[in-house]
Image (cartoon, rainbow, N blue to C red):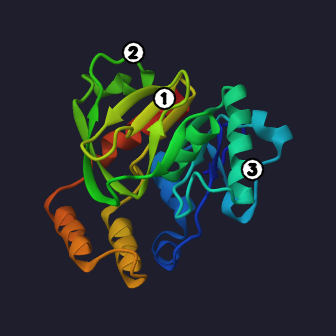
Amino acid sequence: MKVEGGKRYAVLLATKDSDYAKKVYGGYFNVYLAAFGEEGESWDLFRVIDDEFPDVNKLQNYDGFVVSGSPSDAYGNDIWILKLCLLLQTLDAMEKKVLGICFGHQVLCRALGGKVGKAYTGWDVGLRKVSIVKDLAPYYFFDDLGEIPTSLSIIECHQDEVFEVPLGAEVIGFSDKTGVEMFAIGDHILGIQGHPEYTSDILLNLVDRLLSMDAMEKGFADEVRLGMQTAEPDRMCWERICRNFLKG
């Protein structure tokens, strides 16, 4: 998906590829590419979890960045997380478009002055209905949805959350589980706690792995599987929102 002269984007991958993701999708980068990429664009991969970062002198060449999910804590002090925070502060100062997903949503909030931490209510895994705040300021990434939906279902898998958004940020979405499901700063920063890029099979494989590591109780895992059988996320709508944000 590379065409000379097209828009250029980068995925800042904050997780290792699972065996399942490599076998079925060729890695998580391809999952993001399928969800957000379009013909005529150039997409680069930087494995920030492995300390692979874009050249600061070439940041101006990019039209936007996507920060992925991660098993790491966004409030942690690993060297790569601190470097990522500095990069996000730089991109914000440049007013480059940055889309943060799950961990990306949280670390983006932290980097720009918000507060994140372990969720008081524990794991949120499976489908979650996100309510869109009424009477929002006009955000262009909702423009081609017709009327702004009152709620959208999304796949979630997290045990950390945003407690307080940065100064100047607006909370766009919330749920009965998490107070900040979605936030924006101007037209260049967008954080989404859920996974607009996830398919059901990716989540169910992740649940199996968490269960095998004793990181999740079997009864809870069974509830997640049942929930995924009886309902579907609004993936098309979420993908459109993310594409509109990155490319608008």
Q: Which residue is mark 3?
A: 83
Residue 35's spot in the image, x, y percent?
A: 45, 50
Residue 37 lies, with reference to residue 52, above or below; the image says: above
Q: Amino acid at mark 3?
A: Lys
Q: Is residue 61 left or right of residue 199?
A: right
Q: Tell me how far mark 1 sits from mark 3, CA to CA.
A: 22 Å
As drawn, which residue projects farthest toward the right? 57
Q: Are marks 2 and 1 in contact (CB under 8 Å)?
A: no
Q: Dot 1: what SS?
A: strand
Which one is nearer the viewer's eye here, 214 or 65? 214
Is label 3 in a helix, a strand or a loop?
helix
- Which residue is at the front of the view, 194 or 216? 216
Tell which tag, 2 or 3, sits nearer the viewer.
3
Q: Amino acid at mark 1?
A: Ala
Q: Residue at position x 34%, y 18% from top? A: 136
Is 29 on the left-hand or right-hand side of 215?
right
